[in-house]
Amino acid sequence: MSTNDVEEGRGDFVQSFARGLAVIRSFDAEHPSLTLSEVAARTEMTRAAARRFLLTLETLGYVRSTGREFALTPRVLELGFSYLSALSLPEIVQPHLERLSREVDESVSAAVLDGGDIVYVARVPTRRIMSVAITIGTRFPAYATSMGRVLLAHLPQDERDALLAASALEPLTERTITDRSALARRLDEVAAAGFAITDGELESGVRSVAAPVRGRDGRVVAAVNVSASAARIPIERLRAEHLPRLIAATQAIEADLRLV
C-alpha cells in the first residue's frame, strides 16, 4: 500500500512525514550510498521531492552528502535507540550475553523480529566469522537464521504464514532452505524443540544455535544465539555443550524481564 492510498483512507495521515521515513529506509546494507536519482527511484518520488527530503535530513544531521552521493549518518541510530531504550531489552540482555560469551568463547547475539527480518539489538563478538560486520541494527532475513527461525516458529500460525508468503526465499548459500513447505516443517520442529540450529544457510562455514526469550506474558519477544565457525565447532558440540548454556542464559534473561 502506498502512502497515497493510506492518506486517502486516513484524514490524519501526514504524507510528508511518511515520505521522509521512506527516504531513510531507501538506504540499506546493499545500498549504503545513493545518488539523488537512485533515492527518487527507490522511493517513487520526483527528483525535486527527493532532493527536498534529503536536504532536510542533511540539515538535521541524519544524512551527509559526498559529491553526487548521499549516505545516512550514525545519528539515525537515535531513532532506533529511542525504541530500544523504552523496551529496556538490550540493557537487560547485555550482561547475560557477556557471561554466555565467556562460557562458550564464541560470539553471542540477541535479536528481535521486524517483518521478515531479524534486527540485532545486543551482541558480544569474540572473533570475525562472517564476511559482513554485525553491529546493533544489522538486519538479516529471518528464514535463513537460527534466531529468525526461533522468532518465526513462535508466531501465531496466521502471522507466520503471512510472513513466509511475503518473503522472497532466496538461496543465500547452497544450504539455504528455500522451499516453503520444507521451511514450514522446519519451523514446526523448532517450535516443538524450543531451539533452532542452522548450518551454513546464511553464510557458508557459519553455524548457529538459537533459543527464544519470553516476556512476562509468555510471548517470545527476542531470541539469543551462539555463532561459531563450522571448521572449529562440530554440530554435535554445538548441541551438547553450547545449547545447555544458551538455554540457561535465556532463562536468566526471562527471570530479569519478569522483574521489569
Image (cartoon, rainbow, N blue to C red):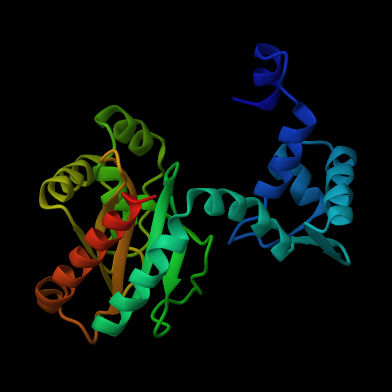
Whether residue 13 can be seen here: yes
In the picture shown, does residue 127 fall above or below 2?
Answer: below
Residue drawn at the location 60% of the way across and 56% of the way down: 81
Q: Which quarter of the picture shows residue 52?
A: top right
Where in the figure is residue 212, as x and y percent of width and height?
A: 26, 53
Residue drawn at the location 33% of the way across and 70% of the way down: 96
Identify the image quadrant of the N terminus. top right
Where in the figure is residue 27, as x and y percent of width and height?
A: 67, 54
Q: Nearer the viewer, residue 117 or 193?
A: 193
Residue drawn at the location 40% of the way across and 85% of the way down: 127
In the picture shown, does residue 48 fall above or below 139?
Answer: above
Whether residue 145 can be seen here: no
Q: Which quarter of the picture shows residue 22?
A: top right
What is the count of numbered marks?
0
Where in the figure is residue 6, as x and y percent of width and height?
A: 65, 20
Where in the figure is residue 58, as x and y percent of width and height?
A: 85, 56
Residue drawn at the location 82% of the way across and 63% of the way down: 64
Instruction: Classify residue 235 as left or right of residue 165.
Output: left
Q: Nearer the viewer, residue 176 or 256?
A: 256
Q: Nearer the viewer, residue 234 or 259?
A: 259
